[in-house]
Amino acid sequence: MIRTAGEHGLLVETGSLELSHRLDAALRADRPAEVVEIVPGPETVLVLAPGADQGRLRARLADVVERERGKGGAVAAEGAAVTIPVVYDGADLDSVAALAGISVDEVISRHSGRELVVGWLGFAPGFAYLTGLDPVLEMPRLDTPRTSVPAGSVAVAGPYSAVYPTASPGGWRLLGRTSVRVWDVAADPPSLFRPGMRVRFEPA
């Protein structure tokens, strides 16, 4: 289904992160002239196109969705995985180990032992939800969020991991920190992460 989203947008309901990534990649490879922003989500893609003929754009999006739905499979990631060095000294490292019933060393090993994939960006500019976390490390958020989490904090919550791009309140469980800047307003693009990118954490 494709819904109107505000004055200039259309929201495509994809029903899956995989199809969101496929649609995002297809639109970026062959972007309609009026489209200025494409924002994939876990089950949606928001397409902003000020001044566009929304009826024509809606029809084109429907065609692309139908084509990409028929392909199946995940979008092939471009380039090598981004490596994020992490000092594993987070405030919640011990409690995550206790909740998971494993040692701190195993938490670190499981967190850094596989490639994750950027699902989508949200919550704050540059905040990427990384999918593919080891299920053993899936944790509920803190009952009481912290009023401020430092930029560069590496954390887990639910089935996701993330790097806090800036200092902000947050209820994710902190495993460690990295010196890599994942959000830089002076960079082009400002976010290090983009949907579909592969990411690997590495003990520093």
Image (spheres, helix red, strand yellow):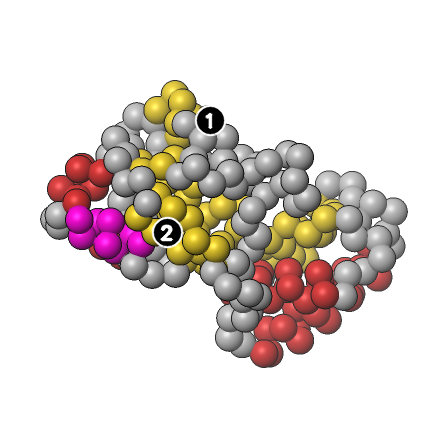
- Disc 1 secondary structure class: loop
Taking 90 as reference, is 21 left or right?
right
- Disc 2 secondary structure class: strand
- Whether 111 is among the magenta residues is yes
Rendered location of residue 171, percent (x, y): 35, 32
Rendered location of residue 147, percent (x, y): 39, 21
How far apart in space, not on screen, are marks 2 and 1 (Cα)? 20 Å
What's the amino acid at mark 1? Ala
How many numbered discs, if any? Answer: 2
Taking 63 as reference, is 160 left or right?
left
Per the rendered image, the range of residues in magenta is: 105-112
Q: Which residue is mark 1?
A: 167
Residue drawn 76% across and 66% down? 30
- Whether 93 is among the magenta residues is no
Question: In the image as oriented, which residue stretches furthest toward the front?
Answer: 204
Residue drawn 40% across and 56% down? 200
Rendered location of residue 119, percent (x, y): 49, 54
Q: Which residue is mark 2?
A: 201
Q: Nearer the viewer, residue 80 or 157?
A: 80
> From the viewer's perspective, is the residue at label 2 or at label 1 nearer?
2
Residue 141 appears in the picture as rendered: no
Q: Nearer the viewer, residue 75 or 65?
A: 75
* Circles 2, 1 touching at the beta carbon (< 8 Å): no
